[in-house]
Amino acid sequence: MSKQKNSPHPALEYVLGNLSEDESSPGDKRASATGVYTTSLSLARALSVGCLARLDSASSAVNIWDPTAGSGFAGSVLVSALQSAGVQTTYRGQEINEAATAASQARFQTDPAAEIARGDTLAYDAFPGFAADLVIVDPPWGMSWAGSSTEVNARQNDGAFSFGLPQHSDGIWLFISLALEKLRPSSEGGGRVAAVVNPSTLSSSGASGAVRQRIVEAGLLESVTRLPDGLAPDTNIPLYLVTFSNRPKDMSRGKAMIADLQTEFTTEGGRRTMPVNAFRELETGLRSGKPGPRNRIITVRHFTRRDGILARTVNDGMQLSWRVTTYADTPIDSHFVESRYGQASGVSVVDAARETVDLDPSRIFGDDSRDLIKGIEATGWRARRLSSLIATEPVSVKATGDTFPDGQLFIPTNREGKVATASSATGSGGRVLSILLDAEALEPSFLAAWLNSEHGVTSRRRAIEASSTGKFVNALRSDASSLMRWADELIVPVPDRSTQLELASADERLASFEAELSAQRESIWASPETAESVVSKIAGAFDNSLSSWLEQLPYPIASALWTAETASTPGDQQRAYIHAWEAIVTFHATVLLSASRTDPAHSSEVETAIGETLKQQNLGIERSSFKTWVIIIERVSKEFRRTLEKGDADDIARVRRSFADLDQGGVERLISKELVDKVNEVNTKRNQWHGHNGYTSDDDWRRQVRSLVADLSELRQIFGNVWAHLLLVRAGTSTLRRDGRIQTAEVAVGTRSPFKKQDFRIGDQMIDGDLYLVKDGSQSPLPLGQFVQLRSAPRDAQYTSYFYNRTDGTRVRMVSYQHSSESEIHDDAEDFRSEFGRLSLG
């Protein structure tokens, strides 16, 4: 077996070593004054990894061609890496810009085997007799080649551009075509191309799509990798690394690797870079040809995208039609229609679908509708697309008091607004979407209630994101075609008619109860003497609500709350509830810190600021207090909220990945301003009560307990069902299967242990015995920091939760807030230093 198959090429260590960004062009920008372009270090590394992953380590000499050399930085990284491994290199670069050519020539002036020529690579080849083993292509994205069309057409007549010509707006495929033609012939061993491209290069139809299809059908495509946005700060467009090979054994495979590294970035000083581990993972996948946490091997047929038109005739004979797109070689036929819309939906296919070779792997990797449909079907209901349930096309209207026909439903396009049967009741500024339901399919009041639920808001948000378009501003358009596309993306439940009416009635009654509660709350201020009777009358309905909630909570919190609920005296119960709240803030701060630390560079900046704040308030992580954890929650939550509010797709995906791929609505609950306000409020109460050193009667204890329980009820409302989706687990054994990794884990949820075991489909393997937050299908389970620990008793397999309290010299004190044989334990402080991170300024 070849040596390079077993281990990385030795040149890789140089590529991933301690390199710096190119100083000749700070910020990785095409400098407006000089026009000089230099590749960022992350993109240069990506190009080098793409070239080196399958390069035979036995090769003693390598020819490199760089048709869009820029300042020569990317080429110099690859050349220097190979030379560091003892490989003789011959580099040829070509660049159209005079200043960039001069910069590149200066960079390679000490290398006698390197030549850089100035000239338009599309117009002529400055090195016609040069056969390349490796080609790197970092072309100008979105460049028109119309200015070179005369020369390009002439070269094509002479045999160049054998895969055809793309449309004038897309010059990238011309550079890739030349790169493939520049490779050493396949009969002589062939070579490889690594290129950085933008999304339209992978997905556009027309002439560019035809060129792309010919290259794929020729068996030259090797891999497509989604990179993070912002690696080239002069543009935030998504970027991809694409590799090609004309080596005989690669061309015969009929398969390609796809990888998704969109969330694999760290941010420092406002600048994004890819961590070294991400490149190692990419290299392993390319070299081994085996699936990994963020890559998989597919047949090239999976790159087939189909665009078709569907139609449905409604009761008055009018026909509704809309466009639908499928990926991963999914046919648009009667079977597709039935699986998407159900039996007897009345939806039909209009004409044959148009096929395009679409190399964007994003849709192959993830379909965010699956979890939503799975959740609906888990209730025993059918999940349907709104397009199959409406009587007319949706229209965009003003959210005013205008009169509309009966049966209309008004749906806001923002999260804050409410779906309502009157446009003025949506509480949404601007415009809302008006729909008229098929009277036989759905009850408007039921659909309105469901769309206002947590699942419904998630479905609304997903539909808007999936149907929004725009090159610079991604938004939902108001034309009929766009709104029908939105209706087709909005997934809703369709239970039987009696269930719809029952749930709509229940929701209406609960809303009236809410109004009555508000009225009763107001009444006690008008008649204070009625306060006790009002509370007594209502309290019975909520007495058991917290007990049932405990079984959904992570075990460290649930066990502390159970201890409080079962305390024997009012004083003991008050102290136990205070301890339970300490468990809550410690656990939550640990979760947020753990999520933040998935981006080490940015987290370091955030934690440094937190450390300064703690110091200013005479606090510290070494001797933590309730307020210490509150400050951590406050600052980290604010940073996550700020990131989400920017609306950047990569940032949102990264934040979701930080929380084990929890949906955005769930993340927003964990970082909400309401949660921060609540823990601050409890901290204030705690300080007031602890500061009172006089006698406290049982009645006073009971009032304090009721206050703390009321706070828990509000916390439950803030969290919603988030802990039913994001589970605390203790990792066990794992198995790698053809369809991915399956890992068994103990689910540490509720008040009792030992815990039940469950299998999870995951990407990154969890370390056996460690604590994680995970949901089934998580690409990256979230490892929980050591501030919260579970310790088992060998005799009965019962677990006790311990929370970090303080550092005493060489020891760390961990305390328990539940019934256990040991109320505290001690660990070696040195083992905790890494947990403190930048929170400790000492």
Image: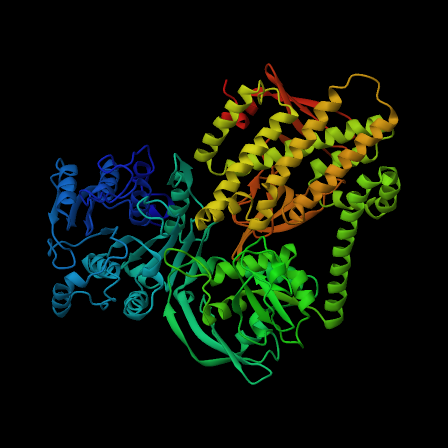
Q: Residue furthest bottom?
A: 317
Residue 625 horizontal side relative to residue 502, left or right: left
Q: Which residue lies furthest to the top in this view?
A: 809
Residue 518 in the image, given as x and y percentages of width and height = 76, 47
Of 694 and 628, the residue lying toward us: 694
Residue 782 in the image, given as x and y percentages of width and height = 56, 41
The number of callouts visible is 0
Residue 541 in the image, given as x and y percentages of width and height = 84, 48
Residue 150 in the image, given as x and y percentages of width and height = 12, 66
Of 59 and 754, the residue lying toward us: 754
Residue 717 horizontal side relative to residue 141, left or right: right
Q: Quadrant of residue 185?
A: bottom left
Name the residue: 29% across, 70% down.
Answer: 210
Name the residue: 68% across, 32% down.
Answer: 681
User: Does residue 728 show up?
Assistant: yes
Q: In which quarter of the image is residue 729?
A: top right
Q: In which quarter of the image is residue 583?
A: top right
Of 62 and 435, the residue lying toward us: 435
User: Does residue 381 show up?
Assistant: no
Image colouring: rainbow
